[in-house]
Amino acid sequence: MKRILFISISAPPKSGPESLQTGKYLSELSKYFSIDLVTTETSSYGWNKVVGKKELLLMPYINSLIELKGYSNRLFSKIKSWLPKQLKFPDDNFHFHTSAKHVIKKLENIPDAIYSRSSPLSSSILAFKIKEKINRPWIMHLSDPWVDNPFLNSNYERNKKWEETCFSSADIITVTNDNYLTFLKEKYPTYQHKFELSYNVYEPIKIKPIDFSQPLSLVYFGNFYGDRSPKVIIEAFSRIYNDSPKELDNVTVSFYGNLDANSQQIIDNANLPFVFHKGFIPFSKIVEVVADSTILINIEDQFTQLSDILFLPSKIMDYISYQRLILSISSNRSPSRSIINKKYGEVFEHDNIDGIVKFIKSTIKAYNEKNYDFFQVHEPDPLFSIEFQARKLMTKILSLK
């Protein structure tokens, strides 16, 4: 069995969407390869704190584990917040990619290939440094854009240099959506042959049918921060509530995840009696909540300044697998639109409050009439399954020389 060196700062049992994706790929790739994983130690502090047991979520799928210092507890996180942005390159895990020699010394066997997942981007830079020393083929996966990420606000020239360096060195570069794939092929015509799609994935699950004897339940999973907030949904429901509060007697709206002070204030100020912030929920508990839900809410950033949106939230694939109608709030330029619209739900732009209100009212009417057909969605597309995508990745790894 061939051996791969899997490099990812975000790995189970850490919480966070990238850690969940990494866990899915680790479990499926372990059927085809021996895996040495390089990651950081877990922490009980922060939004990506440890959830679950390493012995159950990680160790069954890997042959060896190299854990580097994460420096992510309360004290070190505070110290990092004081450091200048120039030092924290390319991210808060800047210390991770300085450990190439240490990682190689820890390896009992030199791998046949290297596979890295970023974000955080320090995973890519460590993979580059290790490839330079052991001369093994490298597949670099980018879950989010690098230099062209609108959230990048420091070290632009340095990031640009490292993006070009890593793109030159990597044998294959995988991204999660067509928008970013097209963008990179135009930006780096010399490396067109390296860029490929590797979607975020879902694991097949069974969810019970909708129970019309329960309240109509709309659920959002994810964090709110910066420009991503519950404002659009709150405004739509406030309109309905102000016009006809009785219409919402059998409706609940629940937000699961971390949120910043601004989002908390939006929820508090609305003072809607059927809206609840339930806080962080471990992934293992989400299926239980989904089983009693009716509608899943997706809210993305607007990115009004971008001609093309280069992000595809990984939660979309999980939502598809849950077989619940999706109410998605995103730009028409988002890669998620073509996946969701008319197959798994309805998509509205952020300023289309009228459309969102109309959809919610139609949903309430259909629910009261027990109209099961209204809530029917397509079967999950096998293209986005972990089985399909991992087998595709396996083939690529085996083809590398």
Image (tube, rainbow, N blue to C red):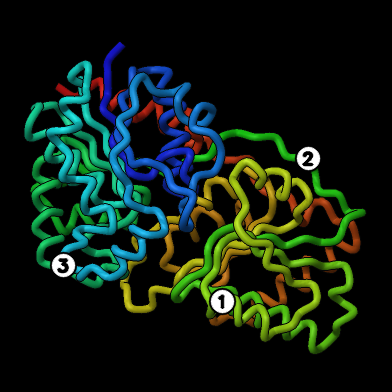
Residue behind mark 1: 263
Q: Secondary structure at mark 3?
A: loop
Which amino acid, mark 1? Answer: Ser
Q: Secondary structure at mark 1?
A: helix
Q: Neighbour class for label 2 at 10 Å: few (<14), some, many (≥20)?
A: few
Instruction: Name the residue nearer the viewer: 282 or 397.
Output: 282
Which amino acid, mark 3? Answer: Gln
- Give the Cα distance between marks 1 and 2: 32 Å
Tell me where residue 332 appears, x and y as whole percent.
Answer: 46, 69
Residue behind mark 3: 86
Name the residue rendered at 73%, 67% in the picture.
Answer: 253
- Mark 3 vs mark 2: which is more N-terminal? 3
Which residue reaches farthest bottom? Answer: 242
Name the residue rendered at 20%, 31% in the picture.
Answer: 103
Residue behind mark 2: 208
Q: Neighbour class for label 3 at 10 Å: few (<14), some, many (≥20)?
A: few
- Mark 1 vs mark 2: which is more N-terminal? 2
Residue 164 versus residue 348 in the image, above or below: above
Instruction: Name the residue nearer the viewer: 211 or 368.
Output: 211
Q: Quadrant of the N terminus?
A: top left
- Mark 1 vs mark 3: which is more N-terminal? 3
Comparing marks 3 and 2, which lies closer to the viewer? 3
Which amino acid, mark 2? Answer: Lys
- Give the Cα distance between marks 3 and 2: 51 Å
Name the residue rendered at 48%, 39% in the picture.
Answer: 13
